[in-house]
Image (spheres, grey):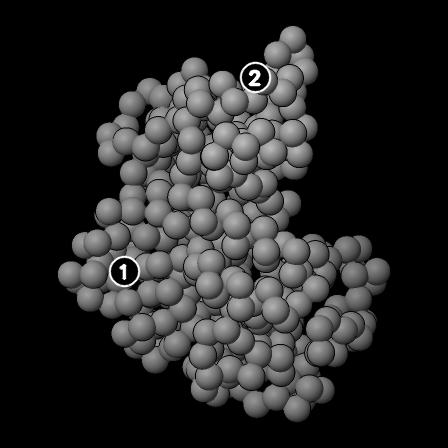
Amino acid sequence: MSHLALRQEGQVKFYVPDPEKYGGIYSAPVFYNPAMEKNRTLSVLVLKSYGAGLTVCEPLSGSGVRGIRYAVESGSVGRLILNDISKEAVEVIKRNLELNGVDAEVYNEDANVLLHKLKNTCDVVDVDPFGSPAPFLHAAFRALKEEGLLCVTATDTAVLVGRYPRKCLRRYGSVMRKTPFYIELGLRNLLGYIARVAASEDFYIQPVLSYWERHYFRVCVYSVRGARDADDVFHNLGYVMYHRKERRVTQFPSQHTSGPLWIGPLGDPLLVHRMSAFDKYKEFLQLLELEYSVHAPWFYKLPEFAVDGKSPTLREALLALKEAGIYATTTHMASDGIKTEESYGEVRRVLAGVI
């Protein structure tokens, strides 16, 4: 392939189609999005903290940079499987593997076909599509061993938060209401869908990392096969009611609820703590660790507590809540957001004294 440009990300150098020659990254014959560097770097840290000698499959590889970074940087990969339905992408993948001295099995197949062929052989499957991951999840679970890690990116965030209600219902089987904390509900919508697919494939899931970043949601879930364990998934599924600024979890839908959603933990604080020892995203990971310790499936935005148009600052709010004996933390999902397990009414009562 002509018109290739050399790039570097992390410890890996690689070729991608030069976006200047093709009119941008979305017009290039092989897709590579530099804005996803954080996604890939955090994923490397997950693998580094997860295990060693792993069989890792990336069924939608594009340029192959994610899988190659796994092999070079994580120290966890024993067998690497890369795939793309595009022949041009496969050509670039092979060139990038050679450039970095990495061995991998490279396929040129439909992602779902390959995942079905890999049934019960993978420790890690990373589904990173352009758009929705929904079409690939059943096959991804079937490719996992009895225990494994499924990592998923979703860039159809507008659908997941409910901006397109019919598409959300059709694609994810959920109904989403307008709320100030719609980003968290969108993330939990994705996890809820993954959990239901997992259960249908006799898997139980436990999120180890999940977060929102501008134009995508990213989740990594530890998965265990077993019908009895799969039944336990439903303890972590439910609906979130939002009415007159109050929030609560319910097991039944109504005109004020969003769901079904994942209402369990968003991640593993201990794993995220280990991850934070490695990288430039240390502050972000430390914030996630704090957020994961708050189990309420929502957050509050400070303008919700405004009096005469004036809201408390983050510092004022956190200090007032701490002095009242209420644990609260900031959230990566809103610059003016706080997470706490206290009710809206109680938080409002405390913050009224600082406005």
- The residue indicated by pointer 1 is 204
Q: Is residue 289 above or below residue 314?
A: below
Which residue is farthest right? 20
The C terminus - image quarter:
top right
Q: Which mark is residue 352?
A: 2
Q: Amino acid at mark 2?
A: Ala
Q: Which mark is residue 297?
A: none
Which residue is farthest left? 228
Q: Is residue 17 above or below residue 316?
A: below
Crowd class of label 2 (few under 14; some 14 to 19; many from 20; radius 10 Å): some
Q: Position of residue 115 (x, y in %)?
A: 38, 71
Q: Amino acid at mark 1?
A: Tyr
Q: Which of the 4 quarters of the picture holds residue 67?
A: bottom right
Question: Which of the marked residues, 2 or 1, is nearer the chain's N terminus?
Answer: 1
Q: Position of residue 112 (x, y in %)?
A: 40, 66
Q: Which of the 4 quarters of the picture holds residue 125?
A: bottom left
Choose between 259 and 174: the one closer to the eye. Answer: 259
Q: Residue at x 28, y 28 (%)?
A: 253
Numbered disc 1: secondary structure: strand
